[in-house]
């Protein structure tokens, strides 16, 4: 595996230490009672994608009382005897100016007037700022029901977006110590507590005996519980065998050949004798994790193949496509939507003898499309388009990186010639606005026209566009400079 994007153990431990050091400086709704580590950090990996942690919180009576007041006054509908109240709606008047300007809630609560108003309602501004406008207006699931959650506030105040590599779960200390954890992992090591605050000593200072016991517990969990669940299924997942059986049945009905036996041969049996060294146990652990990943990904791909086989193949015959090509395309699209990487999906399809190479990926700026060529000429055309979109995407990423800090509502479009050289750059600005805000509309249009943007007055937004002809010889840096000048002159 490439080390690109991986972080050193020492860096991750240091980042956790920085977070813990911030705890006394923050107005959290609860006490952090302990932090436990699990996952790759306990398997001695020198570099990791992330550091898996569970932060355990508890509340003293005063904190419970304060939280109850906050929750009652920062929720869609009142709770208990306050059921007739609409607390969030009551805040709309003071929030409205900030929402219209596109100022995030986390910034709006820093305004002195807003902060004072919230405090009077016993809503700590720093807690309210942990949520977004979308969350408080539409709810977490888009159902219009919002209610504050302790774990979200703790996570966002402690971790935010600036701490790299910490994959944090938040849970009640009482529930966790009773064994009521909803996390899949069952193997934890104390990383920090008020009584044992030395994070490095807690993780790195463990004895060989303790490390070995931890790995044995982890490995036995993989062998006896998780791998069997990935194979046969559980309440949470369908399972490899059922997905394979369904694909086998449907492929026979459709007359489509799929080499399912070849997929079985990719797996190995994981077990331990009891006499393995610590290093050998670590190796077996990684093999077990690899097997689980393979079963998970293969199950998803097989399910998508089954879904494709259920569809009518009339469209295939109409477009002169083979059933195998059509199934490969649908399997790639569906599996990627369900979290399997494209290169992994294609590898699985190759093992199954399905023609994934006939599915051409066109990856542009903000989109990926998969196409099946009708013939050799069409294939060459699609491959050329894929190369052009690759070039366009590279240019647009750099252009947007340059203009977004200057104008958050700006968008770029780039025309290329057949050689992939830039011909025309378009910069557009969209400003959303209420239909009845005539005065504000005039100000926005005047501002855009002063910068030589052509404007359109839509019912829900003001649009400004500007174009620049290009020679085709511009470097990425020159394109960035041109785009920035277009925003200002």
Image: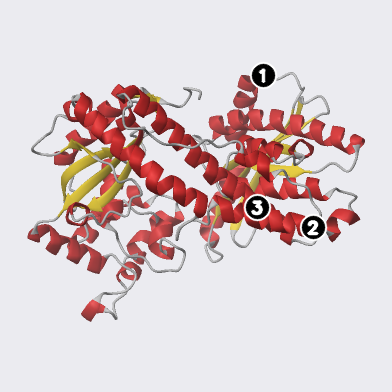
**Mark 2 or 3: the one toward you:** 2
Quadrant occupied by the C terminus: top right
The tag earlier along the polypeptide, 1 or 3, is 3
The count of marks equals 3
- Image x and y of residue 283, in percent: 40, 27
Residue 300 % position (x, y): 58, 49
Classify 10 Å Cα crowding around label 2: few (below 14), some (14-19), many (20 and above): few
Q: In the structure shown, which secondary structural element does the residue marked by tag 1 occupy? A: loop
Q: SS class of the residue under badge 3?
A: helix
Q: Which residue is drawn at 43% across and 58% down?
A: 134
The residue singled out by tag 3 in the image is: 304
In three-dimensional space, the C-alpha distance between marks 2 and 3, rounded to whole angstroms, equals 15 Å
Mark before the other along the chain sequence, 2 or 3: 2
In front: mark 1 or mark 3? 3
Question: Could you tell me which secondary element the residue under label 2 belongs to?
Answer: helix
Question: Residue at (60%, 32%) from the top-left corner?
Answer: 397
Locate residue 120: give its quadrant.
bottom left
Classify residue 480 as left or right of residue 275.
right
Tell which circle, 1 or 2, labels the residue nearer the N-terminal end.
2
> Which dot marks residue 475?
1
Residue 394 seen in the current view: yes
Q: Indicate which label's residue lies in the foreground, 1 or 2.
A: 2
Disc 1: CA contacts within 10 A as few (<14), some (14-19) or many (>=20): few
> Whole-percent x and y of residue 104?
39, 50
Q: Can residue 121 be seen in this view?
A: no
Q: In this view, does 151 lie above or below 72?
A: above
Q: Which of 5 and 258 is in front in this view?
A: 258
**Residue at numbered disc 2:** 254
Dividing the picture into quadrants, the one containing residue 432 is bottom right
**Coordinates of residue 87 in the picture (x, y in percent):** 29, 70
Measured along the vertical axis of the image, is residue 274 above or below residue 255? above
Q: Mark 2 near mark 3, Cβ–Cβ under 8 Å?
A: no
């Amino acid at each position: 595996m490439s080390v690109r994007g991986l972080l050193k153990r020492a860096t991750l431990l240091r980042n956790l230490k920085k977070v813990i050091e911030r705890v006394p400086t923050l107005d959290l709704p609860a006490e952090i009672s302990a932090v436990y580590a699990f996952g790759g950090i306990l398997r001695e990996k020198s570099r990791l994608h992330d550091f898996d942690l569970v932060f355990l919180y508890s509340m003293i009576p005063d904190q419970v009382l304060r939280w109850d007041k906050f929750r009652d006054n920062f929720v869609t509908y009142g709770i208990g005897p306050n059921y007739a109240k609409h607390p969030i709606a009551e805040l709309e008047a003071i929030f409205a100016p900030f929402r219209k300007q596109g100022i995030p809630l986390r910034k709006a609560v820093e305004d002195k007037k807003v902060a004072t108003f919230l405090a009077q309602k016993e809503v700590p501004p720093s807690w309210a700022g942990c949520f977004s406008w979308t969350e408080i207006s539409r709810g977490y699931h888009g159902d219009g029901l919002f209610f504050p959650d302790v774990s979200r506030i703790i996570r966002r105040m402690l971790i935010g977006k600036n701490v790299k590599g910490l994959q944090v779960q938040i849970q009640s200390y009482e529930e966790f110590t009773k064994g009521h954890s909803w996390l899949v992992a069952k193997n934890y090591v104390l990383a920090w507590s008020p009584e044992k605050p030395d994070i490095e000593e807690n993780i790195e200072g463990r004895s060989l005996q303790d490390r070995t016991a931890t790995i044995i517990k982890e490995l036995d969990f993989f062998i006896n519980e998780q791998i069997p669940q990935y194979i046969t299924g559980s309440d949470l997942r369908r399972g490899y065998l059922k997905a394979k059986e369904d694909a086998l049945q449907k492929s026979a009905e459709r007359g489509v050949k799929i080499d399912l036996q070849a997929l079985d041969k990719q797996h190995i049996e994981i077990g331990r004798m009891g006499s393995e060294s610590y290093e050998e146990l670590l190796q077996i652990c990684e093999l077990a994790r690899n097997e689980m990943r393979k079963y998970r990904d293969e199950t998803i791909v097989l399910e998508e193949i089954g879904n494709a086989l259920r569809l009518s193949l009339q469209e295939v015959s109409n477009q002169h496509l083979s059933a195998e090509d059509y199934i490969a395309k649908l399997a790639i699209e569906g599996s990627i939507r369900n979290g399997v990487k494209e290169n992994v999906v294609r590898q699985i399809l190759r093992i199954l003898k399905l023609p994934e190479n006939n599915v051409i990926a066109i990856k542009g700026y903000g989109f990926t499309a998969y196409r099946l060529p009708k013939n050799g000429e069409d294939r060459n055309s699609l491959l050329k388009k894929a190369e052009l979109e690759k070039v366009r995407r590279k240019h647009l990423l750099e252009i947007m990186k340059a203009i977004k800090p200057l104008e958050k509502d700006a968008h770029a479009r780039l025309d290329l010639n057949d050689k992939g050289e830039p011909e025309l750059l378009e910069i557009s600005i969209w400003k959303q606005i209420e239909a009845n805000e005539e005065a504000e509309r005039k100000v926005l249009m005047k501002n855009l026209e002063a910068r030589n943007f052509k404007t359109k007055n839509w019912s829900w937004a003001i649009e400004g566009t500007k174009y620049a002809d290009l020679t085709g010889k511009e470097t990425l840096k020159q394109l960035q400079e041109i785009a920035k000048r277009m925003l200002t002159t």
